[in-house]
Image (tube, helix red, strand yellow):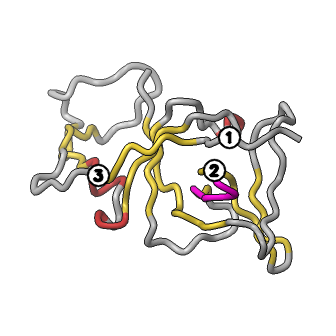
């Protein structure tokens, strides 16, 4: 079994903003390339805040450091959007504090027992089944992801 190390780097709360962050939204499927924003398909502006943030006061971002979720498409240095106001449901990705480390794992219930699953086929990460004696807190539900190419 691998030793646990923190999966995330805390980046902070989303900065309060009076103005939404708009980008042009093109109402068209884009199988290859990107149509000109001047095309006839331009429909409206797209607000990144309203798309990614449900509850601003309970939302913050973290940076993924580990590889525990690479098979879920979450890579090191990805930015994860975390909402503390949501109740976790089985299948959600969660930010948790477990035994001194912040981790991101897939949440499952086995009976009434929560289990935290990695998604990395290399076998270096194990399923975590917190016990009442463990230091365990659910910090929030992952609601979005950002990545630069």
- Residue 99, magenta (yes or no): yes
Q: Name the residue under label 3.
A: 14
Compared across the picture, whether 129 is left or right of 68 comes to: right
Q: Residue at x 49, y 40 (%)?
A: 9
Task: Assess whether mark 1 and mark 2 are in contact (beta carbons under 8 angstroms).
Answer: yes
Q: Which of 60 and 134 is in front in this view?
A: 134
Compared across the picture, whether 69 is left or right of 33 comes to: right
Front label number (3 vs 1): 1
Q: Mark 1 points at which residue?
A: 5
Disc 2/disc 1 C-alpha distance (Å)? 6 Å
Q: Nearer the viewer, residue 149 or 79?
A: 79
Q: Is residue 41 above or below residue 89?
A: above
Q: Residue at x 54, y 38 (%)?
A: 64
Q: Which residue is drawn at 83% across and 53% down?
A: 127
Q: Nearer the viewer, residue 112 or 130?
A: 130
**Dot 1 lies on which element?**
loop
Q: In this view, does 102 lie above or below 146?
A: below
Q: x%, y% of residue 142?
A: 52, 55
Q: Nearer the viewer, residue 134 or 19?
A: 134
- Residue 119 found in image quarter: top right
- Residue 49, magenta (yes or no): no
Q: Mark 2 points at which residue?
A: 101
Crowding around mark 2 (Cα neighbors within 10 Å: few <14, some 14 to 19, many 20+) is some
Q: Which of marks 2 and 3 is nearer the N terminus?
A: 3
Q: x%, y% of residue 69?
A: 68, 40
- Residue range highlighted in magenta: 95-100
Q: x%, y% of residue 41?
A: 24, 37
Q: Earlier in the sequence, mark 2 or mark 1?
A: 1
Front label number (2 vs 3): 2
Disc 3/disc 1 C-alpha distance (Å)? 25 Å
């Amino acid at each position: 079994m691998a030793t646990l190390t923190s999966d995330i780097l805390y980046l902070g709360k989303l900065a309060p903003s009076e103005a939404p962050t708009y980008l042009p939204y093109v109402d068209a499927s884009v199988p290859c390339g990107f149509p000109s924003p001047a095309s006839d398909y331009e429909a409206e502006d797209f607000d990144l805040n309203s798309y990614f943030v449900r509850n601003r006061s309970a939302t913050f971002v973290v940076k993924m450091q580990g590889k525990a979720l690479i098979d879920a498409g979450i890579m090191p240095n990805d930015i994860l959007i975390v909402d503390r106001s949501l109740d976790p449901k089985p299948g959600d990705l969660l930010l948790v504090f477990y035994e001194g480390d912040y981790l991101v794992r897939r949440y499952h219930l086995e009976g009434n027992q929560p289990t935290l699953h990695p998604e990395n086929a290399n076998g270096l990460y194990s399923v975590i089944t917190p016990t009442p004696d463990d230091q365990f807190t659910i910090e929030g539900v992952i609601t979005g992801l950002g990545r630069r190419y």
